[in-house]
Image (cartoon, rainbow, N blue to C red):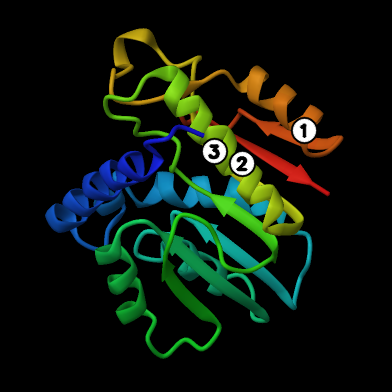
Amino acid sequence: MPKDRPDLLAEVADYYTTKFAEHGETPRGVDWNGESSQTLRFEQLCRIIDKKEQFTVNDLGCGYGALYSFLANKYENFSYLGVDVSEELVQAAEQRFVNQSKSRFVKASTPDQIADYGVASGIFNVRLDRSDEEWRSYFEHTLDELDRTSSAGFAFNCLTSYSDVEKMRDYLYYADPCVMFDLCKRRYSTNVALLHDYDLYEFTILVRK
């Protein structure tokens, strides 16, 4: 892990705090294009969940808690921890779900509990001025944390290196899905799924334990 990881996380927090200040509690407020793509993304990530009730979820990079709303519309008996490095986003999520006893939000870079499932949506996309090597180190460290804090499995997404070249941006990180699949197979589980067929310039990986 880079020695300047606190600075890296502070840069990420500032980036998303600015987006949230501009766009509020909307997908654009967490740097997504719109609600339909956000929902499609959540559907892929939540394929990791194979329990119908009484399960727990850690949402790393929770933003204003949109995934909690998605889960609440599908499941009744679950508990949720949202984790984010932006204090403003965590405060917004706490206010949004102030009366929801099965949700909890904390400002942190890693969960403070072990859950059945860990989910990370979009947190590997915006590298700003960091090099590929720095960002890859952060990426792998975070996957280790997702693995450590989930007992049944975890899921994450990332922009794909198969994106159209003319649409790629220097401040974004595009991962090779084949490389990440191989890493997860070798390091975390023999039961790994790569989802790259849902019409977004990204992929989702599911790691089942």
Q: At 51% from the left edge and 26% from the top edge, which residue is drawn?
A: 136
Asked whether the residues under the numbered discs 2 and 1 touch, taking CB atoms below 8 Å apart as contact, a structural biologist would say yes
Numbered disc in front, either 1 or 3: 1
Crowding near the residue tagged with mark 3, few <14, some 14–19, many ≥20 C-alpha atoms within 10 Å: many
- Residue type, numbered disc 3: Asn
Numbered disc in front, either 2 or 3: 2
**Depth order, front residue of 154/27:** 154
- Residue type, numbered disc 2: Leu
Q: Is residue 141 visible?
A: yes
Badge number at residue 143: 2
Q: Is residue 55 above or below residue 42?
A: below
Q: Is residue 125 above or below residue 51?
A: above
Secondary structure under the numbered disc 3 in the rendered image: strand
Secondary structure under the numbered disc 1 in the rendered image: helix
| First along the sequence among labels 1 and 3 | 3
Asked whether the residues under the numbered discs 1 and 3 touch, taking CB atoms below 8 Å apart as contact, a structural biologist would say no
Give the labeled residue for mark 3: 157
Asked whether the residues under the numbered discs 2 and 3 touch, taking CB atoms below 8 Å apart as contact, a structural biologist would say no
Residue 102 placement (x, y as % from top left):
55, 83
**Depth order, front residue of 180/111:** 111
Crowding near the residue tagged with mark 1, few <14, some 14–19, many ≥20 C-alpha atoms within 10 Å: few
